[in-house]
């Protein structure tokens, strides 16, 4: 990390963040299988064609966090938001999705467990078809780069 990141002027810090974001944006496109080979900490960008859907970070060296993208709605925010979007397209308005909400949907017969599982499977398959970018960087920098990227790129599924 460049010495002035924490001690330099605002302009120097912004320029440093801009360079980091440029490196992330200009990194090679990866498919989901490529993403699963990454064993480094860094910032990732999830894209559908040219639209940026989500920016996230993994502070865990290894594949665990990235695998959670296409695992279960309780494991990753992006997965949860994609599932909510999927339900919305099916005519269900579910603003917040968690284990309790899932149980209420099933108990109230709005959908059965099999329908819910099929929806989750569909979302996971869709995520695996998206494009990704990954920029490896040190843990101390991740929050700053992620927040900067979100504020500049305004991804669809980041709050």
Image: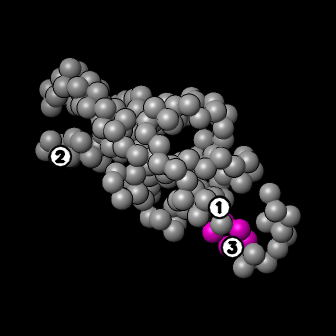
Indicate yes or no whether the magenta region holds residue 14.
Answer: yes
Most extreme residue toward the top is 114
- What secondary structure is marked by label 1? helix
Which marked residue is nearer to the observer: mark 2 or mark 1?
1
Most extreme residue toward the front is 28
- Reading the image, the residue beneath label 1 is 20
Q: Is residue 22 visible?
A: yes
Q: Which mark is residue 74?
A: none
Disc 2 to disc 1, how far (Cα)? 36 Å
Q: Is residue 94 visible?
A: no
Find residue 148 and report its horizontal and vertical position in percent. 59, 64
In the image shown, does 124 or 133 lie closer to the viewer?
133
Name the main secondary structure of what is drawn in magenta.
helix
- 138 in relation to 66, above or below: below
Q: Quadrant of residue 125?
A: top left
Which stretch did the figure color magenta? 13-18
Q: Which mark is residue 89?
A: 2
Disc 3 to disc 2, how far (Cα)? 40 Å
- 41 in relation to 51, above or below: above
| Left or right placement of residue 99 versus residue 112 in this view | right
Residue depicted at 72% across the width and 79% down the height: 11
The 10 Å Cα crowd at callout 1, few under 14, some 14 to 19, many 20 or more, is: many
Residue depicted at 34% across the width and 39% down the height: 129
| Left or right placement of residue 155 versus residue 27 in this view | left
Mark 2 or mark 1: which comes first in sequence? Answer: 1
């Amino acid at each position: 990390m460049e010495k002035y990141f924490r001690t330099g002027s605002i302009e120097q810090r912004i320029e440093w963040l801009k360079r980091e974001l440029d490196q992330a944006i200009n990194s090679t496109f990866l498919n989901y299988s490529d993403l699963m080979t990454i064993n480094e900490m860094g910032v990732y960008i999830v894209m559908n064609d040219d639209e940026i859907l989500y920016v996230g970070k993994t502070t865990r060296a290894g594949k665990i966090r990235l695998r959670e993208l296409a695992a279960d709605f309780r494991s990753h925010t992006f997965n949860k938001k994609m599932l909510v979007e999927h339900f919305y397209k099916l005519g269900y308005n579910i603003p917040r999705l968690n284990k309790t909400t899932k149980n209420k949907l099933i108990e109230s017969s709005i959908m059965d467990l099999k329908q819910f599982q099929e929806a989750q499977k569909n979302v996971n398959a869709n995520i695996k078809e998206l494009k990704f970018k990954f920029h490896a960087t040190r843990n101390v920098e991740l929050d700053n780069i992620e927040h900067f990227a979100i504020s500049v790129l305004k991804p669809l599924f980041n709050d």
